[in-house]
Image (cartoon, rainbow, N blue to C red):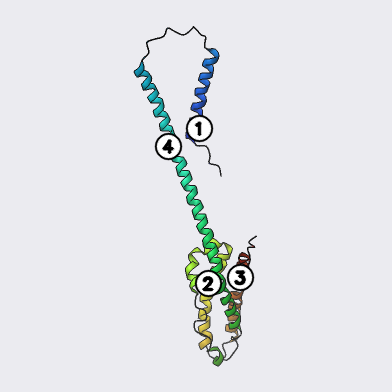
Amino acid sequence: MKEPISGRDLFVISTLCTGFGVLLAWGLFYRWGSAPPAKPFDLSAWVQAIGSIIAICVAIYVPWRQRNHQIQDARRAEALRAQCEREALRIMHGAMFQPIESFRAICVETQKFIRKPLADRKDLPEELFERPIEFNQFRNQLHLMGETGYTINLLISRQDHLRVMLKALRTGADPLGKEFEAKAERDLEAGRQYAEKVLAVLEKVALGNTG
């Protein structure tokens, strides 16, 4: 992306154009022999004039050069940040697949226990819906994954909710009640759908098909 021309750049260009115009006009309209008699050569005045011109040039060049360095540093920092984000995305896409697939399978299997007697339901593992370490490790960076990261956040929230439901399944009296059973089925089905939506994206990424 091209940088816009700054006021300093316009000043330098204007100064050069003005100087060139003055020289051109002098060359076109100067009449040889019309100049006044030459005065004695004043070396100190010329040295002072040349020094002033050099000082002006330095005053223009140094900030311009510093600005260019700042632009280059900003571009390098932006390129490094983008590279780090791409690497983080690659790692997250790979790390999330297994825990989300496990969550999907758990939702499917738990649905089978909703209408079973307490003797069978109490055998469900207490840690069934514990949060995987990958979810905690990458949750602050899920925004980098866009819509997929948002869906994973919904899945994590659903997992917290299902952990409470699991306790009722393991300890609730027979029967649990149609209202509870229907709600539990809806919650597990929603969790399964979130997982399958994310897995479909992760599989595309794994195959290099991100279009």
Q: Could you tell me if the residues under marks 3 and 4 are in contact, i.e. CB atoms within 8 Å?
A: no
N-terminal of the pair, mark 1 or mark 2, is 1
Q: CA distance from mark 4 to mark 1?
A: 14 Å
**Amino acid type of disc 4?**
Pro
Q: Which mark is residue 10?
A: 1
Residue to which mark 3 is pinned: 199
The front one of 26 and 41 is 41
N-terminal of the pair, mark 3 or mark 2, is 2
> Which residue occupies the extreme left position in the image?
44
**Amino acid type of disc 2?**
Ile
| Residue 93 image-quadrant placement | bottom right
Residue to which mark 4 is pinned: 63
N-terminal of the pair, mark 3 or mark 4, is 4
Query: Which SS class for mark 4?
Result: helix
| Residue drawn at the location 51% of the way across and 30% of the way down | 13
Q: Position of residue 146 (x, y in %)?
A: 56, 61
| Residue drawn at the location 52% of the way across and 82% of the way down | 166
Residue to which mark 2 is pinned: 156
**Amino acid type of disc 3?**
Leu
Q: Position of residue 184 (x, y in %)?
A: 58, 81
Residue 197, compared with residue 11, is above or below; it is below
Residue 136, compared with residue 113, is above or below; it is above
| Residue drawn at the location 53% of the way across and 15% of the way down | 27
N-terminal of the pair, mark 1 or mark 3, is 1
Q: CA distance from mark 1 to mark 3?
A: 55 Å
The front one of 179 and 134 is 134
